[in-house]
C-alpha cells in the first residue's frame, strides 16, 4: 500500500471510530442514564459509508441525511460537543435543543440536516442541487437514506428530475437490510438488484460493499466528480448492516441474534481496517491503539462538556417559528 | 350467560387490537396493511399477533409507501374490501393526504352515489414523547375541514374499541386518530361486544359551573384540571366529543346551557383548530347563554421542540387548563 493511502486509511479509521464511540456513548451511558428523550437511531455498523462518502465531498458540497445521520454529520466535521448537547436537549446543542437526535443540522458545514421523514430528503437534495447549479457553484449534494426510502414516490420523483435536469446529486442508499422490522426483500421488488432502478432513469447505479471504507471512498469520488463535471446524478447502493436496533427502544425480535453476531464478526467495518492494517504489517498496532485512545479521550471530553451545559428555558420554545423580519407572527391573538 | 357489566382492564393498544380482531373475525372483508404492522405488530403494538392469527394475506407489511398505502386502501374499498390501514405517524398523513382528501372523501359523492369508500385510516399523533416537530403533530383540523370524511380522535380504551368497531362498519371513510402517548394507558372495557356511535359526544365528568370540551390526550389534562378545580369549589363538566366530524354540538350546547361557561382544550393549536369551530358554533347558536366569551387552550403556535423544558411548556397541561377556567370564572 502506498504511504498516502496508508495515511488515508488511518484518517478513515479515526473518522469511523469517532462515530462508533460517539454512538456507543449514547447506547451505553446516555440510554441507561435516561439522558435523552424519545429514541435515537444509531449507525453502528454503517460507519464506513458515512466516512467514505463524506470524505469524498469537497468544501463547496452539501449533504442531507435521514434519521440515522449522526455519522454523516460527525464525518462532515460537526462539533461533537454540540451534537451531544443537542441529543441531551441542552441550549448549547447544534439546534439549540429544538431538534434532538433526528434533526441535527449545521449550515456552516454544508449539512442541510437530518430528515427523518423517509423519502422526503430526495427531492430536497435535487432542489438544492438545482440551486447550486443556477447560482454557478460547482457544488454537489449527497443525499443519504436507507433502502426503505427507495419505495417512496418522493424518491422516484426526485431521481427522475435529477436525471432529466442534469442535477449534481449523488443518491446514497445504505442498504442495511431492514426498514425497522421489514426486510428488504419483503418491501422491494428485485431486492437483490435495487441499484438497477437507476437504469430506468438513465443514470449510473452501482452496488458496492459498504463495509470496506476504501471501496466506498473510491466509488464516491467517481460519482461526485461525475456529478460535478457532467451534472450526472448517480445512485450508489452500499451493502451494510446495523449491529444495533432500529433505534434505542427496538425489541429486535424480527431478526435472529445469531445473524447480528455473525455480521459483526465477519463484516465490522472498523475491524476490517484493523485487520487489513495488521495483516499487511502496514503500521504498528500501537499506532491504532494510540488513535483509539485519542478518539476515546475526545468523545469523553465532548460528552462531559455537553453534560455540564445549560438547559433551554421553557419560553425559548416560542422563538424561531418565523424569521423575525416583518410582523410578529406570534400574534395569533391567542395564548395557544 | 355473561355479565353485561363485566369489564376488562386493558391498555389503549389492547383495546384497538381487540376491535381489529373482533371485526376481522366477524367480517372477512376486513383487511389490514401498513408499515411494520405484521411481524413487528406495529411500532406501538396495536396489531401484535394479528398477522399470526389472520395470515399474511389479510395482514400485510407494506414498504414505506404512504401514498400507496392509502391509495390502495381507497381502490380496494371501492371494490368491496374494508381496509383498515395504518400510517405510522400522523405527520406522514401529509404523504398520504391525496388518498384521504382528494380520493376517499370524494369518490362516493363524485360518482353520484355509485361508489362508497369503507376505509379506515388509523394513525397515531401527539407530542410529549420527545420526538420533536415531525413526529408529534395533531392534524385533526386538516381532516375535519373535508366534507365526506369522518374524523375520530379518542384516547380512552373503551372509546377506542367501540368507535374503531363502528368506524370499520361504517361505509364512509374514517380518519381514526390515536395518541402515541396513550398506548399503555389502561382503562375498563366491556368484555362483551360494544359498538359506540360515531358522532356522539360523551360527558366524562358532569359538573355545573363550566363546560370543558377536550379530546385526545388533552382530555386527561382536562380531567385532572377538573379534579384540581373541585378542591377549590369549581364544579367542571368535561365533555369528550370523540368524533370531531361530525361534531355532536347538541351535547355541547346543552351543557353550555347549564354551565354558561365554555373552555375548549386541545393538544393541537387553537388557531384554525377544531376548538375554533366549537367556540364559533357556541357563540353563533347560544350567545345569549354565555356569561363570558369562550376560552380556548391549545399548544403554543410553534412546531413542537425536542428538549423537555420547551416541549412541556408548549403542550397544555392540567395547570394551564385550570388557569384558563379560573380566569374565565373570575
Ligand atoms: C414517510 C415516513 N414513513 C414512515 C416513517 C417511520 N420510519 C422511520 S424509520 C423507518 C424505516 C426506514 O428504513 P430505511 O429507509 O431502510 O432506513 P434505516 O432506518 O434502515 O436507516 C420508518 C418506516 C418515517 N419516518 N417517514
Image: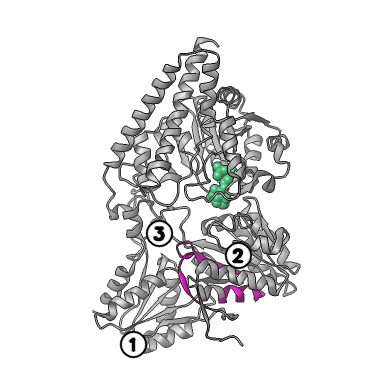
| SS at mark 3 in the image | loop
Q: Position of residue B193 (x, y in %)?
A: 60, 80
The one nearer the camera, A134 or A221, is A221
Q: Position of residue A209 (x, y in %)?
A: 62, 29
Answer above or below: position of B330 versus A123. Answer: below
| SS at mark 1 in the image | loop
The answer to whether residue A297 is magenta is no
Q: Quadrant of the C terminus of chain B?
A: bottom left
**Residue plotted at (61% across, 75% down):** B165
Relative side of A126 to B33, left or right:
left
Q: Give the label, 1 or 3, closer to the camera.
A: 3
Residue range of the region highlighted in magenta in the rendering: B162-189
Q: Chain of mark 3?
A: B
Instruction: Please rate how many residues cluster around mark 3, counting C-alpha atoms within 10 Å: few if below 14, some from 14 to 19, many from 20.
Output: many
**Number of marks drawn:** 3
The one nearer the camera, A285 or A248, is A285
Contact? badges 2 and 3 (CB < 8 Å): no
Give the Cα separation between the discs numbered 2 and 1: 37 Å
Q: Is the CB of the residue bearing disc 2 within 8 angstroms of ligand 1? A: no
Q: Which residue is mark 1?
A: B208
Q: Position of residue A267 (x, y in %)?
A: 58, 30
Instruction: Please rate how many residues cluster around mark 1, counting C-alpha atoms within 10 Å: few if below 14, some from 14 to 19, many from 20.
Output: some
| SS at mark 2 in the image | strand
Q: Which residue is mark 2?
A: B121
- Which numbered tag is attached to residue B128? 3
Q: Are marks 2 and 3 on the same chain?
A: yes
Q: Position of residue B32 (x, y in %)?
A: 66, 63
Q: Quadrant of the N terminus of chain B?
A: bottom right
Answer above or below: position of A178 versus A80. Answer: below
Relative side of B205 to B40, left or right:
left
Amino acid at each position: 500500500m502506498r504511504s498516502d493511502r496508508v495515511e488515508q486509511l488511518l484518517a478513515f479509521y479515526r473518522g469511523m471510530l469517532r462515530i462508533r464511540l460517539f454512538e456507543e456513548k449514547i447506547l451505553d451511558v446516555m440510554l441507561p442514564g435516561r439522558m435523552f428523550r424519545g429514541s435515537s437511531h444509531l449507525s453502528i455498523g454503517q460507519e464506513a459509508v458515512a466516512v467514505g462518502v463524506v470524505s469524498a465531498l469537497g468544501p463547496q458540497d452539501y449533504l442531507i441525511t435521514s434519521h440515522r445521520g449522526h455519522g454523516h454529520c460527525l464525518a462532515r466535521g460537526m462539533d461533537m460537543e454540540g451534537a451531544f448537547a443537542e441529543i441531551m436537549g441542552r441550549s448549547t446543542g447544534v439546534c439549540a435543543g429544538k431538534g434532538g437526535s433526528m434533526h441535527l443540522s449545521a449550515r456552516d458545514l454544508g449539512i442541510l440536516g437530518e430528515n427523518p421523514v423517509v423519502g422526503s430528503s430526495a427531492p430536497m437534495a435535487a432542489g438544492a442541487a438545482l440551486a447550486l447549479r443556477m447560482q454557478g457553484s460547482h457544488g454537489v449534494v449527497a443525499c443519504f437514506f436507507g433502502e426503505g426510502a427507495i419505495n417512496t414516490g418522493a424518491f422516484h420523483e426526485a431521481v427522475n428530475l435529477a436525471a432529466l435536469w442534469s442535477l449534481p446529486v449523488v443518491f446514497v442508499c445504505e442498504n442495511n437490510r431492514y426498514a425497522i422490522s421489514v426486510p428488504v426483500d419483503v418491501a422491494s421488488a428485485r431486492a437483490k438488484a435495487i441499484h438497477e432502478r437507476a437504469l430506468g432513469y438513465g443514470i449510473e447505479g452501482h452496488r458496492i460493499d459498504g463495509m470496506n471504507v476504501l471501496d466506498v471512498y473510491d466509488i464516491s469520488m467517481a460519482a461526485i466528480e461525475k456529478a460535478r463535471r457532467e451534472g450526472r446524478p448517480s445512485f450508489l447502493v452500499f451493502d451494510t448492516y446495523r449491529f444495533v436496533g432500529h433505534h434505542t427502544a427496538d425489541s429486535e425480535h424480527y431478526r435472529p441474534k445469531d445473524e447480528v453476531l455473525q455480521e459483526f464478526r465477519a463484516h465490522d467495518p472498523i475491524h476490517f481496517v484493523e485487520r487489513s492494517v495488521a495483516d499487511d504489517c502496514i503500521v504498528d498496532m500501537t499506532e491504532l491503539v494510540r488513535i483509539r485512545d485519542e478518539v476515546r479521550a475526545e468523545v469523553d471530553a465532548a460528552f462531559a462538556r455537553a453534560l455540564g451545559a445549560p438547559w433551554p428555558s421553557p419560553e425559548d420554545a416560542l422563538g424561531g417559528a418565523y424569521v423575525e423580519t416583518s410582523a410578529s407572527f406570534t400574534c395569533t391573538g391567542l395564548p395557544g | 350467560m355473561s355479565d353485561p357489566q363485566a369489564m376488562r382492564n386493558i391498555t389503549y393498544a389492547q383495546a384497538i387490537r381487540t376491535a381489529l380482531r373482533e371485526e376481522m373475525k366477524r367480517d372477512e372483508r376486513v383487511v389490514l396493511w401498513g408499515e411494520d404492522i405484521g411481524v413487528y405488530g406495529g411500532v406501538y403494538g396495536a396489531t401484535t399477533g394479528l398477522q399470526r392469527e389472520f395470515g399474511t394475506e389479510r395482514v400485510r407489511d407494506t414498504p414505506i409507501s404512504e401514498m400507496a398505502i392509502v391509495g390502495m386502501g381507497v381502490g380496494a374499498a371501492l371494490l368491496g374490501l374494508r381496509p383498515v390501514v395504518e400510517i405510522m405517524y400522523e405527520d406522514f398523513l401529509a404523504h398520504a393526504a391525496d388518498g384521504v382528501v382528494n380520493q376517499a372523501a370524494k369518490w362516493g359523492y363524485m360518482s353520484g352515489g355509485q361508489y362508497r369508500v369503507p376505509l379506515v385510516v388509523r394513525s397515531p399523533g401527539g407530542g410529549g414523547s420527545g420526538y420533536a416537530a415531525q413526529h408529534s403533530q395533531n392534524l385533526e383540523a386538516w381532516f375535519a375541514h373535508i366534507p365526506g370524511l369522518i374524523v375520530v380522535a379518542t384516547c380512552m380504551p373503551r372509546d377506542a374499541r367501540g368507535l374503531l368497531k363502528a368506524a370499520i362498519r361504517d361505509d364512509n371513510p374514517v380518519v381514526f386518530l390515536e395518541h402515541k402517548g396513550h398506548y399503555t394507558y389502561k382503562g375498563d372495557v366491556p368484555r362483551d361486544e360494544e359498538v359506540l356511535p360515531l358522532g356522539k359526544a360523551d360527558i366524562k365528568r358532569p359538573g355545573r359551573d363550566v363546560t370543558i370540551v377536550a379530546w385526545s390526550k388533552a382530555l386527561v389534562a382536562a380531567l385532572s384540571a377538573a379534579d384540581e378545580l373541585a378542591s377549590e369549589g369549581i364544579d367542571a363538566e368535561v365533555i369528550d366529543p370523540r368524533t370531531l366530524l361530525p361534531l355532536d354540538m347538541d351535547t355541547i350546547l346543552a351543557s353550555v346551557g347549564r354551565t354558561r361557561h365554555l373552555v375548549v382544550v386541545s393538544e393541537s393549536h387553537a388557531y384554525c383548530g377544531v376548538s375554533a369551530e366549537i367556540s364559533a358554533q357556541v357563540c353563533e347558536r347560544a350567545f345569549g347563554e354565555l356569561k363570558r366569551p369562550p376560552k380556548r387552550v391549545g399548544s403554543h403556535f410553534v412546531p413542537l421542540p425536542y428538549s423537555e423544558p420547551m416541549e412541556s411548556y408548549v403542550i397544555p397541561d392540567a395547570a394551564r387548563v385550570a388557569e384558563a377556567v379560573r380566569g374565565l370564572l373570575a
